[in-house]
Image (tube, rainbow, N blue to C red):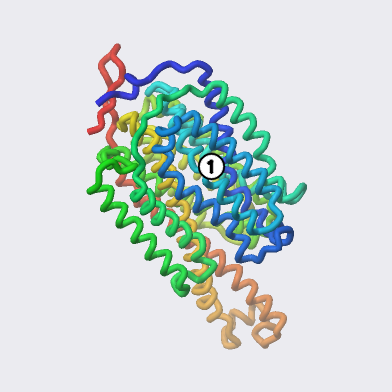
Amino acid sequence: MPTSDEHFKEVPHRGLITGSIMLGTIMQVLDTTIANVALPSMMGDLSASRDTVTWVLTSYIVAAAIMTPVTGWLSDRIGRRELFLTSIVGFTITSMACGLAWNIEVMVLFRLLQGLFGAAIIPLSQTFLLDINPKERHGSAMAIWGAGIMVAPIIGPTLGGWLTEYFSWRWVFFINLPVGIVAFLGSAAYLPKIAIRLRGFDFFGFAMLSLGVGALQLMLDRGAEVDWFSAVEIWIELGLCLTGFWVFTIHLLTAEDTFIDAAIFTDRNFVTGLIFIFVVGIVLLASLALLPPMLTNLFNHSTVLTGLVMAPRGVGTLISMIIVGRLVRIIDARILVVVGLLLTAWSLHMMTGFTPQMDDNLIIVSGVVQGLGLGLVFVPLSTVAFATLAPQYRTDGTSLFSLVRNIGSSIGISIVTVMLTHNLQVNHVELSTFISPFNPALGAISPAAQAGDPTALSMMDQLVNQQALMIAYIDDFHLMMIVTLAALPLALLLRKPRAAAAGAPAVVHAD
């Protein structure tokens, strides 16, 4: 099996290339979260209801999910450099179009196009960083890439809230223009050209995978709004999802010349990496989805203050990325992954100690620890997952890596949202049983409530709601801690690439 080093050629202006493609990467990742806080402002300007405005998020997520797997084929067909530049231009133009949208239908259309153009940016940026760096520098390259992937979602809601509050929701999209221009100019000037590799397109396989992925994303995104399986829509989407994935799997195993080569799944490190990144996606964005509403509803924080409290989480991730980029060269990556998972689980355990009466210190400390832990997982995992993968599979591999991470994030957010709603109701019922005129403890706390005063009972109900919601959040954090610890045995499946003899190039094996 040829090695990545045998294919490697020194590329000039590596630092400028890295900076340019990371600008494009951060721009695309930011748009998955930056628009969330702007939705209430959009409703009035675009004459949209609460139900229809959520399609601003749904259309983008579904379009990006469907187009991500086909990145490998497109890059082979028209060239990686050309596809990346086209994606940057298309994403920037459609971002401006979103900012100029005059009604909800036009906005959803432009967001759909934005998702289609943005889908290839993440996998191609990872592929380019692996291509332009020798194998011994892959850890540092993945540290830079991981910093953009993991920090951007953290700062997205804060930046979106600040732009919406002090300017307009339209600036959430307009801000992409200068970033996109710089990313395009830098990439156009320095990105190396890669030879085009023509291969046929598997339309049937792509259609079935698109059906499965699109229906799954729709189901996860719409479930909470339509009360999940009480709605016919969700059952239809579940049926389409299962049908698409089942037919695609059979097609992949039995057909020839599928648009994703089944041989890619014979690499144990890569397959284990996909499972790991699925777990990372669950923990990373699920916790990010929980904390802002918790800080707003329970701690009465403003959007800006919420962002400031969560900012140290990003700082922890950046510190971890800087350190692990060097550690991965001297310490077994599998050890770093285990340490990272343990730190992440510890941070989630700390979060189970949250109370409505505490200050922000525990939130900040647990955020920093979680940022450190996820960074220690993400970089070695990205390095090891591609260490034994043949270079010709690299773009398909990064596409699947991004797709699985995004699906994990969507599933994680849906699970914690459902659990939060369910546990809130259960906790409220259980706590309410103690509010009784026959309970002497109630009389000691509020004699007026025990006597049946409506105002006092209303205040008592607000306290019960607060405590029930806090317990529901704690239950979610506990669940994510269990998921994180359950992923630990997967580290045993990872194989350390064998080093070459001294003076010879490093060799990786796909056994």
- Rendered image quadrant of residue 443: bottom right
- Rendered image quadrant of residue 236: bottom left
Q: Residue furthest top?
A: 503
Q: Amino acid at mark 1?
A: Gly
Q: Secondary structure at mark 1?
A: helix
| Residue at 53% across, 42% down | 118
Tally of numbered tags: 1
Q: Classify residue 295 as left or right of residue 221.
A: right
Per the image, the residue denoted by label 1 is 118
Q: Is residue 134 above or below residue 343?
A: above
Residue 74 can be seen, yes or no: yes
Residue 501, position as x, y percentages in the image? 25, 16
Q: Quadrant of the C terminus?
A: top left
Nearest to the observer: residue 189 or residue 167 = 189
Q: Is residue 373 above or below residue 192?
A: below
- Rendered image quadrant of residue 71: top left
Q: Classify residue 402 as left or right of residue 184.
A: left
Residue 324, position as x, y percentages in the image? 45, 31
| Residue at 43% across, 51% down | 408
Residue 162 can be seen, yes or no: no
**How many other residues sit within 10 Å of disc 1, few (<14), some (14-19) or many (≥20)?**
many
| Residue at 46% across, 53% down | 349
Nearest to the observer: residue 170 or residue 339 = 170
Residue 472, position as x, y percentages in the image? 51, 65
Q: Classify residue 414 as left or right of residue 442.
A: left
Q: Quadrant of the N terminus?
A: top left
Nearest to the observer: residue 476 or residue 38 = 38
Q: Classify residue 11 as left or right of residue 489.
A: right
Residue 18, position as x, y percentages in the image? 53, 26
Q: Is residue 412 above or below residue 425?
A: above
